[in-house]
Amino acid sequence: MISTDISVWIAAFFTIAATSYVFKDNIIFKFAEYTFIGVAAGHALVMGFENIKKYGWSHLVAGEYIYVIPFIVGILMDYRYHPKYYWLYRYGIAFLVGQGIGLSMRGMVHTDFIKQIAATAGPLTAETALGTFNAIIIFILTITCLTHFIFTIRQVHIGTVSWLPKIGRYGMLLAFGAAFGNTVMTRFSQYQGRMLFLLRDWLGIAAP
Amino acid sequence: MGLEKVGAMPRWLVMTIVVILMAIPLIHPLGILPAISESTTDFYNAIDQLKPGDVVLFDIGFGSGGYPTLGPAAVAILRHCFSKDLKIVIMATQQEGTVIYPLLMDKVKPEEVYGAKYGEDYVFLGFITGVQTAMAAVLGDLHSATPKDYFGTPIENIPMLADIKGADDIDVVVYLTTAGEVAEGWVYQAYSRYNKVTCGGWLSMMTPSLKPYYDTGALAGMLDGIRGAAEYEKLIGQPGDAMKTTDVLNLTQVWVLILVILGNIAYFAVRGKEGS
C-alpha cells in the first residue's frame, strides 16, 4: 500500500529528482541538487559551531586555559581570506599538518610498510594449491610492478628485460579492472537502496 | 544498426534497464542467498566470541550517501552486539553520522527488542571532529575527549562510562565507513597503537586498497560493502535489507558484463573500420 507519510513522499520526490539527471539535466534535478547542498552546508555549519562549543569553549570556560591555543590556531586559519596578512594561515596549516603526520606516522610505518612487506615476503608454498598459486602471483607481480617504476635506469624499459615492467603493467591493469568492477557494484548497491525505498517504503509493492 | 552504434547506447536506455532489473527481484525475490566469505565470518566471530558486558567501540563513519550500502551492515552488527548483551560506545567520525544514528536505532530498537537501556548498555557520543585526532583522543582518554554525550549528558553522569575510560577498557573496535582516512585511521590508532581487535566495513570500491589490512592481520574482520552486509545478516539469522539486494546485485552485474562485452565489440568494430 502506498505510503501516507509526508516525509516518505518528500524523500521519494528527491530520489526521483536526483535520478532524473540520467535522462537529461533539468530544473527538477537542479532543485534537488541545490537543496541537498543547502541542507548539507547548513548541517555542517551547525555541527562546526557545536564542535567549537563542545570541544573548545566548554573547556575554556571551565578554566582550562590551554584550550586558548586551538582557538588561536583556528583564527589564524581564517587569515587565508585577508588580502595583506593571508600568510598567517600557514601557521595554522603547519600545525595541522605536523599534528596529522605525527599521529599517523607510527601506525603507518607499522601497518603500511613493515607488515605489508612481511606479508608479501612470505613462503611461496601454502596449504592449498590455490594458496600456492596466489603466493606465486603476488611474488611475480610485486617484483614486476616495482620494475615498472624504475625510471632512473632506462635499460629496464627498452633492454632485454623490458618484459618485466610489461608484466607489471598488465598486472596493474588487472587490478584497475577489479577496482572498476567494485566501483560499479558500489554505485549499484547505493542506488538499489533507493529503489528498495521507492518500491517498498513509498509504493508498497516490493516484498516486505 | 551497425556494431559501432552499440557503443553509443543512450544513457537513459542503460539506466532504464538497470531500474527494471532492480525492480523485478525486489517485487518478486529470486531467493539467491549469498555465499559467506571468510572475512565476514571473521568479523562475525570477533563479535560473537565476546562475553556479556564486554565493550565494543562502534564508529558510524558514513553519511546519507553511504547509508544504502553500510546502513544494513550497521543494523546487523548492532543487532548482534545487543543480542550478546555487550556494552556499545557509539561515535561518529563523519558529520552526518549524527543523522544516521537515529535511523539505525529505529531499525535495531534496542529498548523494545533487547531490553537495553541508554546510558547503561549503549551510549552515543556524537560526531567527534578530527578523524585520527578524534580516534587517538577517544582511545587515549575518552572522558577528556568528549565531556558530554550527543544529547548533552555529562560523561560522568553516564553509568556505563564509569569504567570505560580508554583503549584498555575497549575489547573490539568496529567501524563502517565511506572514507579511506577513517578506514586507515582506525588501523593506525586502534590496531597499530593499542593492538586492539579491529574490524572494518566499507564500500566495495574501497576493498582493493583496504583488503591488505585484513590479509596482514591488522583487521580481524572485514565487511565488503552490501555483499558483506548480506552475509552478516545471514550469519546472525536475521534477513534484512542487504539480503533483499543480493538478487538485485546479481542481475545488475550481469547487465554490466553484457555492457562491457558490447562496449568492447563496438570499440573493435570502430577501430577495424578506421583501419580499413
Image (cartoon, coloured by chain):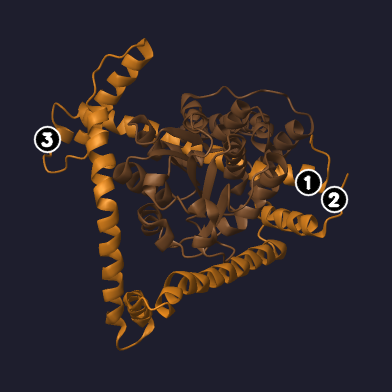
- Crowding at dot 2, Cα within 10 Å, few <14 / some 14-19 / many 20+, comes out as some
Q: Is residue B273 visible?
A: no
Is residue B99 at least partly visible in the picture?
yes
Amino acid marked by disc 1: Asp
Q: Quadrant of the C terminus of chain B?
A: top left
Task: Please identify the residue farthest to the bottom as the structure is shown.
Answer: A84
| Residue position marked by numbered label 3 in the rendering | A155
Q: Which residue is denoted by mark 1 in the rendering?
A: A201
Chain whose colour in the figure is brown: B
Q: Which residue is mark 2?
A: A3
Which sits earlier in the primary sequence, circle 1 or circle 3? 3
Which numbered disc, 1 or 2, marks the residue that appears first in the sequence? 2
Quick check: B64 above or below A158?
below
Q: Taking B21 as reference, is B8 above or below it?
A: below
Residue sitting at x 83%, y 56%: A5
Q: Amino acid at mark 2?
A: Ser
The chain holding disc 3 is A
Residue in front for this viewpoint, A179 or B236: B236
* In the depicted structure, whether residue A204 falls above or below residue A145: below
**Type of residue at label 3?**
Gln
Disc 1 from disc 2: Cα separation: 7 Å
Question: Residue B226: image x %, image y %?
Answer: 58, 37
Chain A rendering hue:
orange
Residue at figure coordinates x 43%, y 80% from the top left: A61
Image depth: mark 1 or mark 3 in front:
1
